[in-house]
């Protein structure tokens, strides 16, 4: 039996390292590509090969073109919404140009490779639609980060039509779990866990009524396996293979803080700070399409996922 080969960009990071673990457990030979700007070398599974480079580099293109991969899971990104607002040029350079570097290398490799792209269900739709957001809703991102992610989806659609590229876009809601980096908006659960561990106040931006859809990292990793297993499209056909990944449950920041304190038995003050630019008011996704086409549903209840995440932080 031929060994299936997978590349995980950003595989030293929070979500990517869990995905690398899941792929290895599923029998894949895994290569991780990461520049370690935010990822950690120690999070790369011992059984995975490691390539230390930037996704914008010629070395990354060579890795994709010559690696013989059956699956490329592209998670490497500039992921901080606030940084994208402060420096949209840098965000576009990494998230758009870096992605195109990999996609072009895949096009010229001569292989039929499945490209699974980590997009965003939390930022791509914007505030002009009423959640829960469907994949078919208009896209009006409120931040350069969301704009860049959607731009890559549009490029993937182009490459599918013109070059028969085989791709799946997974639009993540707010992913949380062990190994989450406690920096930036995406790390709110990790930040709260660290502060609960230290007994320091939780900072909530604005009134705390802004909502998110919190999905456990292990569930997101499993969705990638389902995406990898989708049958190839017949030659000449194009399908918009974009899927929301979330829980379809809307949780406010204040509710999240209360759930964490309830689950851990630790109580600290909640302090309010000014609202942040580019932050959506409501974000929750509909996952009916993923249920139907991928056979995927989230398995981890929020309370249990938060407890596991806190236990991981508390053990460090």
Image (spheres, rainbow, N blue to C red):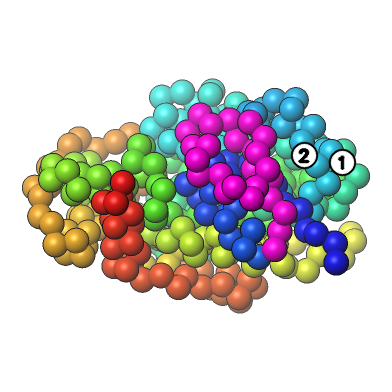
Q: Residue at x 50, y 44 (%)?
A: 43
50 in magenta: yes
The label on residue 64 is 2
Q: On the image, which quarter does residue 206 sit in? A: top left
* Left or right placement of residue 1 versus residue 182 in this view: right
The part of the image, by quadrant, that contains residue 1 is bottom right
| Element marked by disc 1 | loop
**Dots 1, 2 in contact, CB < 8 A:** yes
Residues drawn in magenta: 27-52
Identify the disc placed on residue 109.
Answer: 1
Q: CA gap, disc 1 to disc 2?
A: 8 Å
Quarter of the figure with residue 279:
top left
Q: In this rendering, is residue 142 above or below 130? A: above
As drawn, 130 above or below 32: below
- Which one is earlier in the sequence, the residue at label 1 or at label 2? 2
Q: Is residue 116 magenta?
A: no
Residue depicted at x 56% and y 72%: 296
Number of other residues with Cα within 10 Å of mark 1, as a class: few under 14, some 14 to 19, many 20 or more: some
């Amino acid at each position: 039996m031929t060994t299936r080969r997978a590349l995980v960009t950003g595989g030293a990071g929070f979500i990517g390292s869990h995905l690398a673990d899941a792929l290895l457990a599923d029998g894949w030979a895994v290569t991780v590509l990461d520049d370690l700007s935010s990822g950690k070398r120690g999070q790369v599974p011992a059984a995975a090969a490691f390539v230390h480079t930037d996704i914008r580099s010629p070395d990354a293109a060579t890795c994709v073109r010559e690696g013989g991969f059956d699956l490329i899971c592209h998670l490497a990104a500039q992921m901080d919404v606030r940084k994208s607002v402060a420096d949209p040029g840098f965000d576009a350079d990494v998230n758009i140009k870096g992605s195109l570097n990999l996609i072009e290398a895949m096009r010229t490799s001569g292989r039929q490779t499945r490209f699974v792209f980590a997009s965003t269900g939390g930022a791509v739709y914007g505030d002009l639609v009423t959640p829960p957001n469907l994949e078919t809703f208009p896209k009006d991102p409120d931040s350069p980060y969301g704009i860049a992610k959607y731009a890559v989806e549009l490029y993937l659609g182009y490459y599918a039509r013109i070059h028969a590229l085989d791709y799946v876009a997974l639009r993540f809601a707010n992913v949380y779990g062990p190994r989450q980096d406690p920096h930036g908006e995406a790390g709110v659960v990790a930040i709260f866990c660290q502060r609960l561990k230290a007994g320091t106040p939780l900072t909530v931006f604005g009134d705390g009524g802004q909502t998110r859809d919190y999905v456990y990292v292990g569930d997101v990793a499993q969705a990638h396996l389902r995406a990898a297993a989708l049958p190839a499209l017949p030659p000449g056909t194009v399908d918009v293979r974009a899927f929301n990944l979330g829980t379809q449950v809307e949780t406010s920041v204040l509710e999240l803080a209360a759930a964490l304190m309830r689950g851990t038995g630790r109580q600290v003050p909640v302090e309010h700070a000014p609202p942040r630019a580019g932050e959506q008011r409501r974000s929750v996704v509909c996952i009916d399409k993923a249920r139907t086409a991928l056979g995927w549903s989230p398995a981890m209840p929020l309370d249990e996922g938060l407890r596991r995440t806190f236990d991981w932080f508390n053990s460090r």
